[in-house]
Image: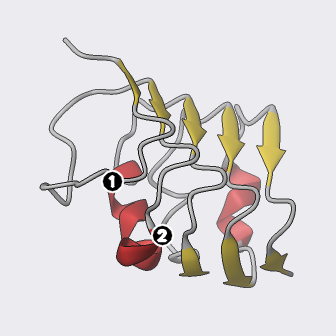
């Protein structure tokens, strides 16, 4: 079964499904132009309870991180969402990610 997907550096990426039908452990969408999806693209990531690594850095994502985003990623170890146009607050549910080792939310407008 498919576990790792790397679609980085695809400026013309088209995503046809709102939920990926896989049990992914690694998803890389860095340097993709995901601006047309706003934060709805985060629905691709969550719910994916098997994900351990997510890199959606530099992907032109705009808006707030959905409240339930962190609760649906119990195995997450690495999350890179830097250099996007994220705003708002970071939900307290992030503190429940017991396996999280690396978190990069730099160059955003989060509090």
Residue 60 located left or right of residue 3 = right
Judge whether 8 appears above or below 17 on screen: above
Q: CA distance from mark 2 to mark 1?
A: 28 Å
Mark 2: few/some/many CA within 10 Å (<14, 14-19, 20+): some
Secondary structure category for the residue under label 2:
loop
Instruction: Quarter of the image for the C terminus: give it.
Output: bottom right
Rendered residue at 79%/45% (across/down): 103
- Residue 48: x, y in percent? 35, 42
Reading the chain from its start, which is encountered first: label 2 or label 1? 1
Rendered residue at 60%/40% (across/down): 55
Secondary structure category for the residue under label 1:
loop
Judge whether 18 appears above or below 38 on screen: above
Rendered residue at 31%/50% (across/down): 13
Residue 26 located left or right of residue 79 = left
- Residue 50: x, y in percent? 40, 29
Rendered residue at 65%/50% (across/down): 57
**Which residue lies most toward the front here?**
11
- Residue 35: x, y in percent? 46, 73
Q: Say the numbered circle drawn on residue 12.
A: 1
State yes or no: discs 2 and 1 in contact (Cβ < 8 Å). Answer: no
Mark 1: few/some/many CA within 10 Å (<14, 14-19, 20+): few
Image quadrant where residue 7 sits: top left
Judge whether 33 appears above or below 29 on screen: below
Considering depth in this image, is 84 or 52 the residue closer to the camera?
A: 84
* Disc number lying in front (2 or 1): 1
Residue 85 located left or right of residue 103 = left
Name the residue that disc number 2 marks.
68
Indicate how the structure is coloured in the image. Answer: secondary structure
Instruction: Quarter of the image for the N terminus: give it.
Output: top left
Residue 19 located left or right of residue 96 = left
């Amino acid at each position: 079964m498919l576990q790792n997907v790397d679609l980085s550096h695809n400026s013309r990426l088209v995503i046809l499904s709102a939920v990926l039908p896989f049990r992914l452990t690694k998803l890389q969408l860095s340097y993709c132009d995901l601006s047309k999806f706003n934060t709805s693209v985060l629905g691709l990531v969550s719910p994916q309870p098997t994900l351990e690594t997510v890199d959606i850095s530099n992907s032109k994502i705009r808006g707030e991180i959905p409240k339930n985003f962190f609760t649906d990623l119990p195995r997450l170890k690495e999350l890179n969402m830097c250099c996007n146009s994220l705003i708002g607050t970071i939900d307290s549910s992030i503190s429940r990610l017991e396996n999280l080792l690396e978190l990069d939310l730099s160059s955003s407008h989060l509090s």
